[in-house]
Image (cartoon, coloured by chain):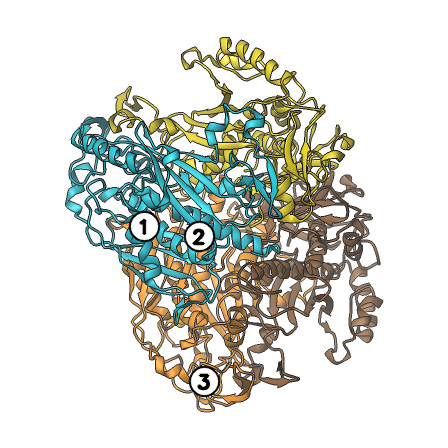
Chain colours: A yellow, B cyan, C orange, D brown
Amino acid sequence: MAGNSFGTLFRYTSWGESHGPAIGVVVDGVPPRIPLAEPDIQHWLDRRRPGQSRYTTQRREPDEVKILSGVFEGQTTGTPIQLMIDNVDQRSKDYRNIADRFRPGHADYTYWKKYGIRDYRGGGRASARETASRVAAGAVARKVLGSGISIRGALVQIGLHAIDREAWEWPAVEENPFWCPDRAMAVRWADYLDQVRKAGSSAGAVIEIVASGVPAGLGEPVYDKLDGDLARAMMTINAVKGVEIGAGFGAVPLSGEQNGDEIRMKDGKPVFLSNNAGGILGGISSGQDIVARFAVKPTSSIPKPMRTIDSEGHEVEIETHGRHDPCVGIRAVPVGEAMMAVVLADHLLRYRAIGGEV
Amino acid sequence: MAGNSFGTLFRYTSWGESHGPAIGVVVDGVPPRIPLAEPDIQHWLDRRRPGQSRYTTQRREPDEVKILSGVFEGQTTGTPIQLMIDNVDQRSKDYRNIADRFRPGHADYTYWKKYGIRDYRGGGRASARETASRVAAGAVARKVLGSGISIRGALVQIGLHAIDREAWEWPAVEENPFWCPDRAMAVRWADYLDQVRKAGSSAGAVIEIVASGVPAGLGEPVYDKLDGDLARAMMTINAVKGVEIGAGFGAVPLSGEQNGDEIRMKDGKPVFLSNNAGGILGGISSGQDIVARFAVKPTSSIPKPMRTIDSEGHEVEIETHGRHDPCVGIRAVPVGEAMMAVVLADHLLRYRAIGGEV
Amino acid sequence: MAGNSFGTLFRYTSWGESHGPAIGVVVDGVPPRIPLAEPDIQHWLDRRRPGQSRYTTQRREPDEVKILSGVFEGQTTGTPIQLMIDNVDQRSKDYRNIADRFRPGHADYTYWKKYGIRDYRGGGRASARETASRVAAGAVARKVLGSGISIRGALVQIGLHAIDREAWEWPAVEENPFWCPDRAMAVRWADYLDQVRKAGSSAGAVIEIVASGVPAGLGEPVYDKLDGDLARAMMTINAVKGVEIGAGFGAVPLSGEQNGDEIRMKDGKPVFLSNNAGGILGGISSGQDIVARFAVKPTSSIPKPMRTIDSEGHEVEIETHGRHDPCVGIRAVPVGEAMMAVVLADHLLRYRAIGGEV
Amino acid sequence: MAGNSFGTLFRYTSWGESHGPAIGVVVDGVPPRIPLAEPDIQHWLDRRRPGQSRYTTQRREPDEVKILSGVFEGQTTGTPIQLMIDNVDQRSKDYRNIADRFRPGHADYTYWKKYGIRDYRGGGRASARETASRVAAGAVARKVLGSGISIRGALVQIGLHAIDREAWEWPAVEENPFWCPDRAMAVRWADYLDQVRKAGSSAGAVIEIVASGVPAGLGEPVYDKLDGDLARAMMTINAVKGVEIGAGFGAVPLSGEQNGDEIRMKDGKPVFLSNNAGGILGGISSGQDIVARFAVKPTSSIPKPMRTIDSEGHEVEIETHGRHDPCVGIRAVPVGEAMMAVVLADHLLRYRAIGGEV
């Protein structure tokens, strides 16, 4: 099966290149009679939009979404929903110098090896611009999930600087350009990233996505487990190199008795005394918060010169000028939220199919 | 789509419970005229087989595989290959005491919530016994990949005890019961796990899988990226809580110039000067070694008592006696290898479909 | 995706060759807590079983089904259900003479061209024996559909001899070896087929399958329409060359006003005044009876000599002796019923996923 | 899986309603470096375009296609290809009178029952306008197939008036507004359809699609057989009620020896002496012409009044004025060709995946 679709019942297909006329996404499998209008989607696209602070790329894209199908008189009809975003700020001339050179850490080399042709303008299909399609699909997924399920993301580490989890306050996330839940750390990151930017370098990041209000029962063992689908969803985001659920790699040094989340009853309902499982047991949601975390590598396109080759096999150097993102991880927060949303929406529909009352 | 299949063109469907009459796997999409016989599969099953050291469960299963279809006169025919393994050592009586209690960290609670019924005997479908099906499918995948691609796994950390990467020697992996590539560390792990076992506790582990000889070009952007599929493949293995590719979470503290794998020419061929990417760029293999790592949580079933509830909502305690696996991560090594193999075989066929000469 | 699976949510994977040790089917996606036992499946297999009259092949197969997984204490558990049928009456020696010759009308030639290898014993994977797997899966599908939906099939034409639709009586179907709903025609068919058999020839047939009690709303436009899926389902049965829904090809000579099924109200409910649509409009069930019809070509293996070639390109003659089925269409009736059942079960689950209360 | 996609490796997703701003299709899985430009697609869309004779609807649509992604410097890049067609001649006011009434033979009633909402303007998603997306995808499929495979369609019957097969001349198809290969019959159809139109009625049709130059080996037994996929492909075209391969229903009255296509050698190659199989044996192409035929019912929207109900359950009458297509089958010819192309392209890629040299 061709690789540009995601999901089984709630299924979207993404298309478009960084410097083509437009990008977009067809969302298929949306139940009928859900209220949906462009502002519902625009809201989330605006959060991902580049150029909102000096810490992200200065590409100026309004990212204005149009609904071309699947909605009638303000409601979904059960037919496929085409969401289109015109590319406005393309500046193709910036990229001529990298047409024949493979930027280290980028997909340039592998696209060229695989396809024998590549749209080098702005990374073409491999550009992070594709993530706008994910955010648009995620906005529709949130409508499918309904207001009882909330999905929030935060940046919890840049470079070596991890937040203090004791200082976590969700409102703080909306108050700084980093989606940082630790106010003190946000200040330190600002300084740190200014240094990184001036040095012509870049930094990696860790993002955490938390879904609350998810009912127990989502996930289809043993290969479409909820955590398996989340791992795939997050790992396919540009520049992601690792994914964790709950305690993740941090579970390894724990003992069995530390790691197992014990259960008690409270007000007639089961309560877990910890959440090392990240809300997923045996691939199925348990009713606890779903917690996923992913690592984003430092931006590969940097002003510092790097050694590489060109498409004819000559050894050359390359340096990337112009718009420069010192930490691509920042803009990955809304994308991670969107991927959580599409995975949950798909599994919600799948659970309903076998009789789950959700 | 129901959740017990994996892969697109090389696609297998796993079935069976821990204490049913048998488990097995149907492998569909195998190209014709590949030599295949039962010993080719048995070889890998024997590596996964429990009860081979005091560090793994004492369940005694011969795990003898039978080919029921898809092979004629020693060769695959292009039709589906059914591989069946009888369950021999079932001891159903061991499990009566947990029929109504949810073991913390196990799928007991979520299966019961999702399905309203569960085969509690030995974990039923959620048992690690299912991984025998993965290993069987992986053995077929290795035949599809051919001898030019090698897939090897090693255990690189137990609890807090990580190997010394400078001491890595592949032959060592075959010489100790831990698949440990660092001979000195293997000795320390033996002591450590003896303590863990005596304490009635358990330990987590990190496994690393390396595929060499993989041609450039495997992986289908942007949702069926090779790393995305590997992440899903590994995360669906029992007890896995995290997956990394290449530098993984370790890429976060690196600078852009440290992380990007520079390229030079050697003997007329491109050579990467490092492998932080883990052999995958933009979701496509680069020709370097593919490196995936995953975290296995400490065994949830332990002799130490844990607090939980039963299916009627009473607060109870539970302790697991009988066969006890102090570190389930150990047996996950051959399983991780198998999952690497099935992912690569699938993408090899997919690449051929669009003209890739591999 | 490999070709041995059918369905999306209710999805089964068939495996096995005519003369291997066994055939079977894994049914995945079955909702939990449905009572299921071997006799539920055996009942339908017994209807398909060969050798029950002189009008079908004399292969003696008990076709005894075993449930190997997915059922616990008499109920489905939501995990995959493996159904296995041992091959008993294999008589491999019968087939040696056709090992290198391509029987006209058979898959011998195309399997050999495609795969470069073929299990020639009894047709291998291309044998009608595979339809036992369909019937087994169909039996499970019927349980998913519940008792409110009935699926019945009948043979309505053999050779040029079509039934009189005015004489249709469902009970008659159980009273003759042809599933013929027209008692008088059943007598004529008996004579006719005796002649055909004596002449060493064979005859084609038309089968009609009717599903009653199907709720409105099943079918997913525009490519997973209910009629599209039925067409594929029926056309993949061995020897089928045509499929119709409702009036089918008979709609062509009708005028628009004759063909359109008008609607009136009766007892507060919509009533269609005819059923040329065969219960499907725009790919979605309307609540009327679903009516599908398919054409089965005359048996290709006949005692009469036919001209063909062998695998080395020599011109040869071939004649098939031994067990001979003068009209393979007869045994296709339970198979067509099963395919109707699996299509409906799949669409029932899919409709539930988007909120359909069925 | 949601229902608006078709194909496995060559896979397209269609979107759009009759009276929305646009319709389109994303084609995923196209191999790289295939020359493709808008005129390649426009050529086929122009053949389907309405309003070209008095025998088809008078809706005036330029059907101008735009390529929005997946093509770079005149070649495919291996990334998804978005093809968009703006809706120009929408005339929404025409349809207000049918907003609450269910046209007999249309999808109005079933969409309303299934989704509880429907875009009634011009049939919404159920409009034959969707077939433009099929034709666009088919144009891309033809490029994948290459010039060695030709796909041609013809109309072989309108109402009771079938062509004389002895008079079949392919060039004639381009010379009359009916795609009729029998020149004399084309004249009779013109008269007949004028009468039908004046009578405010409509007529059904049979279309035949022939693919030549198809290599042996395409098709994946046993559920993704080539004929199974063609049956689904054709049956999902608007108003189709039956599909045949080769002799189809006409095989039923034949004897086994008449029906089996005998084989001889000619110039060192196998030659079939007839083609009752329609080029497919056991679900796999044999190298002969692939022949598929389908029945299109008479147009349901006719000026003659029909009895129906409205959405509140009142018995009403309905008559359709304005643009009226006396035989929708005529415009189905390019659509049937397109569906043949997409099925073959998909199976070509699938065959390559397992090593087929095509």
Q: Position of residue B157 (x, y in %)?
A: 33, 33
Q: Nearer the viewer, residue C152 or C317?
A: C317
> Contact (CB < 8 A) between labels 3 and 2?
no
Q: Chain of mark 2?
A: C
The C terminus of chain C, quarter of image:
top left
Comes first in the chain, label 3 or label 2: 3
Where disc 2 sits, the SS reads helix
Residue A80 seen in this snapshot: yes
Q: Label 3 to label 2, Cα distance in Å? A: 35 Å
User: Which residue occupies the extreme front position in the image?
Assistant: B267
Q: Which mark is residue B132?
A: 1
- Residue receiving disc 2: C345
Is residue C127 shown above or below A192? below
Q: Label 1 to label 3, Cα distance in Å? A: 51 Å
Q: Quadrant of residue C16?
A: bottom left
- Residue located at (52% from left, 32% from top): A240
Q: Position of residue B281 (x, y in %)?
A: 57, 39
Q: Chain of mark 3?
A: C
A212 relative position to D206: left or right: left
Residue type indicated by callout 1: Ala
Is residue A180 shown above or below C141? above
Image depth: mark 1 or mark 3 in front? 1
Q: Which mark is residue C193?
A: 3
Residue type indicated by callout 2: Ala
Q: Quadrant of residue D244?
A: bottom right
